[in-house]
Image: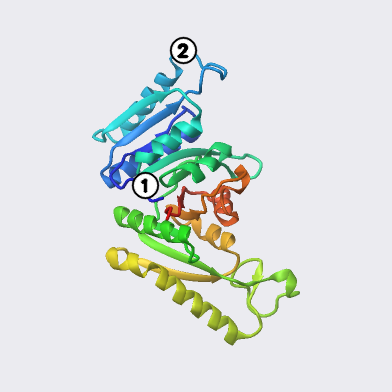
Amino acid sequence: MIGNTRGPVVAAVDGSPASDRALDWAADEARCRGLDLRLVHASGPPTHRPAPDGFGPRVVEEARRRVSERAPDLPVEAVSLTGDREPVLSRESRSARALVLGARHMSATGEMSPGATTLALTASSSCPVVVVPETGPAPRTGRVLVGVDGSESARSAAEWAFAEAEARGADLLVVSASGGVPREDLGAPEGDAPVSEGFELPGDDALVAAAVAESHRLLSESIAGERELRPDVRVEEIVEVGEAAEVLRSLAEGCDLTVVGSRGRGGLVGTLLGSVSRSVLSHSPRPVAVVRAERR
């Protein structure tokens, strides 16, 4: 879902380093878009192990002070609400432009650890969910990345990514992965290096060229409407041979934000995201926005 275009940017806060990084990103996003910022702490119901008295209000006030130092003129509302984090934030998303969450990195692997609640929110949220890693801020690149594959969720992701690039004055990289052949199915590589690690081009160059040309055509068609609506956005169309998650992960480090689609279907937490979206979310060193397809 694209979210309420004039709604606030909602940041979930809990006082952790990951939450602080997400809060900084949310403040910058709200300022960039000319929106209000809403800070939300979910304290959990009374049946849960109680937090120290006044913990929630202290968390949101500390978050408010952090925002005031970063963006003094930004309108901020801060609330501490009782309830489980997922339903509280899911309700908040109904009137939000975006819901921003922090995620810690797993020390052993360097991957992001979004957690079950974050994964569930990517399926239940009524607006895009932006997951920000707790690592320190990286230099801005002026690029936004979005992956497209012709699906409804990818079209929604592209729509949101175009608006994000326009608001930031950023270049937009629109990427599609054209199917390659796994290297293990082809034996040892010969000649030039593969286009994407783990994949080799089939031997028939004419077939490869035709497949890539068709992917370019489909990519261009899928974003033609958005390019017409937002002609000032500088767009680079990229088709790479390889597995989609690998292609997106390889490009994410050079972009300020990666935008991916989500099916937004029910089921176990582990299946709420498609494999590509979940892989990008877990491995990207930069913030990732997950956008669900509009309900028809």
Amino acid type at mark 2: Asp
Q: Position of residue 198 (x, y in %)?
A: 66, 66
Residue plotted at (50% across, 56% down): 252
Q: Name the residue at the left extreme.
A: 73
Q: Quadrant of residue 243?
A: bottom right
Q: Earlier in the sequence, mark 2 or mark 1?
A: 1
Q: Nearer the viewer, residue 38 or 66?
A: 38
Is residue 34 positioned above or below 206 on the image? above
Q: Nearer the viewer, residue 280 or 68?
A: 280
Name the residue carrying label 1: 3
Name the residue carrying label 2: 53
Q: Residues within 10 Å of mark 1 (few under 14, many from 20)?
A: many
**SS category of the residue bearing label 2:** loop
Residue plotted at (39% across, 51% down): 140
Is residue 210 positioned above or below 296 on the image? below
Amino acid type at mark 1: Gly
Tell me the colour scheme of the image.
Answer: rainbow
